[in-house]
Amino acid sequence: MKFSVSSKGDSVSDKLKSRIDTYLQDFGLKMDEEEPDIVISVGGDGTLLYAFHKYSHRLDKTAFVGVHTGHLGFYADWVPEEIEKLVIAIAKTPYQTVEYPILEVTVRYLNGNQEEKYLALNECTIKSTEGSLVADVEIRGELFETFRGDGLCMSTPSGSTAYNKALGGAIIHPSIRAIQLAEMASINNRVFRTVGSPLILPDHHTCVIKPLNDVDFQITIDHLTLLHKEVKSVECRVASEVVRFARFRPFPFWKRVVDSFIGKKE
Ligand code: NAD
């Protein structure tokens, strides 16, 4: 089996990465940065997002596992003290994987430029670089509303605990193949009106956001921020690809939610 270890780049994560590299090679596994079967991310959720994008072209052949060197992460749920246990599990057992849905984003342009496709593990956000975002929101080809406000956020179920949660979106269990649209400070008065609630779309629905004001747009895909000019539309749907996480022990999603956001009772 081939592996790769991605580090956050700080000294603690780098030291842990070299220990994992050595242990796994001692067990006879081959280090392969290009075509790993398993990617161990060492750092935090941001490190796992980075690893996901590095290998997003071969998700069907890659499983991820996250170790956190800071606070407990949603994707990074192993602690450095468990590293020997994790290495043995990777080396010795045919491991199980769980699959989570991800988001497919297609950006189309007015100027005839080639469309761009992206996959997101957490979310895609759209904001105007100047003033409010004014955009038509279409669901399944029908106009749903005209949005005016700071921006829109389309998230995956596993990303529903990230930016989406800060916007008042619901937490969705990642076994549900859906995406969620959440508003960022919509303008609601006698003239402008949006639904005001987050929307959860099933995997056979497509949502197209069509900007109406002629400015540049800041589109984020997870931790990546891109400036797009002359955007005609941004299409979001549940991707046909999935992300796979190697599972060596049960750590139910709702327990992760409790541990991250509520904490233990005294
Ligand atoms: P960062 O360093 O600003 O970290 C953002 C925080 O989000 C970290 O604490 C991380 O652990 C947490 N996080 C990431 N994915 C998560 C998930 N699926 N569930 C729960 N928490 C999660 O940025 P980064 O590390 O580069 O991560 C990028 C992510 O930051 C984006 O995908 C977005 O979700 C999130 N973000 C959140 C807000 C907000 O909550 N207001 C604003 C901007 C970006």
Image (cartoon, helix red, strand yellow):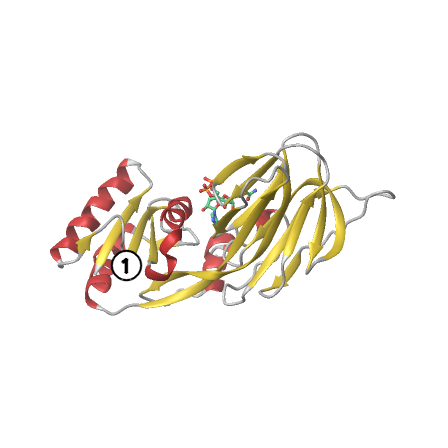
**Residue 69: x percent and y percent?**
33, 45
Residue 47 in percent (x, y) is at: 37, 45
- Density class for disc 1 (Cα within 10 Å; few <14, some 14-19, many ≥20) is many
Residue farthest toward the front in the current orientation of the protein:
112
Q: Which residue is situated farthest in the top direction here?
A: 130
Comparing 210 with 1, the one in front is 210
In the image: residue 145, left or right of residue 43: right
Q: Work out whether residue 80 or residue 242 is closer to the camera in this orientation and state it.
A: 242
Relative placement, left or right, of 18 versus 264 is left
The picture quadrant where one finds residue 115 is top right
**Residue 161 higher or lower than 11, as above or below:** below
Q: Quadrant of the N terminus?
A: bottom left
Please report the residue visible at 52 percent of the width from the left and 55 percent of the height from the top: 103
Q: Is mark 1 within 8 Å of ligand 1?
A: no
Three-letter code for the amino acid on which mark 1 is drawn? Asp
Residue at (24% x, 62% y) in the render: 90
Number of numbered discs visible in the structure rendering? 1
Label 1 sits on residue: 37
Element at label 1: loop
Residue 169 appears in view: no
* Residue 126 showing in the rendered view: yes
Percent position of residue 143, x then y = 75, 54
Spot the residue most to the right: 190
| Nearest the eye: 24 or 168 | 24
Which residue is painted at 42% across and 51% down in the image?
73
Identify which residue, 86 or 55, lies in the foreground.
55
Question: x%, y% of residue 144?
Answer: 75, 55
